[in-house]
């Protein structure tokens, strides 16, 4: 399932968990892969102090269980030509959320889309080359989606990443 999918998730296991509980070695593997997803199994095994076959088995299990959903490069959006970023908040007709999500996944420049509770229905991270393109994405592409009632756009002036994601 990609980050813009809204298909039904697998039924959760005991205590609401969707996969087997992770132990300290699993979490160490995830931290290392999060820092450098290009690590070889040999290097990963050395860093977490387990055998190569053990780390390979654990990584394969976490992929099969959906804990690891893929391996990607972290891209600097400005250096990649996407210097204008904004959060676009969207109000939709409530009965149309699946169709709206499907159509918005087709709109270029939407990096992330999340259904939320509160005053709006969706929050999207949109990255474009410039303000003109951002205007066109919001006013021509997003507003053209049937079921979209209104949008609010919040320009991002500066971004910072947090610390480590996994503890």
Image (cartoon, helix red, strand yellow):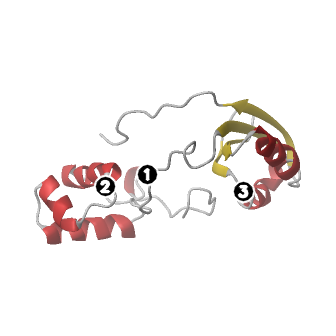
Give how far across and how far down residue 151 sits, in percent: 81, 38
Give the SS element for disc 1.
helix
Mark 3 or mark 1, earlier in chain: 1
- Comparing 116 with 110, the one in front is 110
Mark 1 or mark 2, earlier in chain: 1
Give the SS element for disc 3.
loop
**Could you say which disc has been placed on residue 108 in the image?**
3
Q: Quadrant of residue 33?
A: bottom left
Q: Is residue 158 left or right of residue 148?
A: left
**Could you say which disc has been placed on residue 16 in the image?**
1
Mark 1 and 2 residues: CB-CB less than 8 Å, in contact? no
For the C terminus, the image quarter is top left
Give how far across and how far down residue 75 sits, in percent: 49, 50
Instruction: Give the crowd class for mark 3: few <14, some 14-19, many >=20 residues within 10 Å.
Output: few
Instruction: Give the crowd class for mark 2: few <14, some 14-19, many >=20 residues within 10 Å.
Output: some
Mark 3 and 1 residues: CB-CB less than 8 Å, in contact? no
Q: Is residue 29 left or right of residue 107?
A: left
Residue drawn 62% across and 57% down?
4
Residue labelled with disc 2: 33
- Comparing 109 with 19, the one in front is 109
Q: Quadrant of residue 9?
A: bottom right
Q: Is residue 133 left or right of residue 25?
A: right
Q: CA distance from mark 2 to mark 3?
A: 28 Å
Give how far across and how far down residue 79 sits, in percent: 54, 45
Give how far across and how far down residue 153 sits, in percent: 76, 34
Q: CA distance from mark 3 to mark 1?
A: 35 Å
Q: CA distance from mark 1 to mark 2?
A: 25 Å
Q: Is residue 92 visible?
A: no
Q: Quadrant of residue 54?
A: bottom left
Instruction: Give the crowd class for mark 1: few <14, some 14-19, many >=20 residues within 10 Å.
Output: few
Q: Of the residues tagged 1 and 2, which is closer to the observer?
A: 2
- Comparing 62 with 15, the one in front is 62
């Amino acid at each position: 399932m990609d980050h813009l999918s809204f298909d039904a998730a697998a039924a959760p296991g005991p205590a609401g968990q969707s996969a087997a509980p992770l132990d300290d070695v699993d979490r160490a593997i995830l931290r290392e892969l999060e820092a450098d997803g290009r690590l070889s199994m040999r290097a990963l095994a050395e860093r977490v102090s387990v055998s190569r076959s053990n780390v390979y088995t654990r990584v394969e299990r976490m992929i099969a269980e959906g804990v690891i959903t893929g391996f990607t490069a972290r891209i600097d959006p400005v250096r990649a030509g996407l210097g204008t970023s904004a959060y676009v908040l969207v109000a939709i007709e409530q009965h149309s959320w699946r169709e709206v999500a499907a159509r918005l996944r087709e709109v270029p420049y939407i990096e992330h889309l999340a259904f939320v509770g509160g005053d709006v229905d969706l929050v999207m991270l949109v990255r474009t080359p410039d303000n003109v393109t951002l205007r066109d994405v919001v006013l021509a592409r997003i507003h053209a989606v049937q079921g979209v009632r209104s949008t609010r756009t919040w320009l991002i002036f500066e971004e910072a990443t947090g610390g480590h994601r996994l503890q």
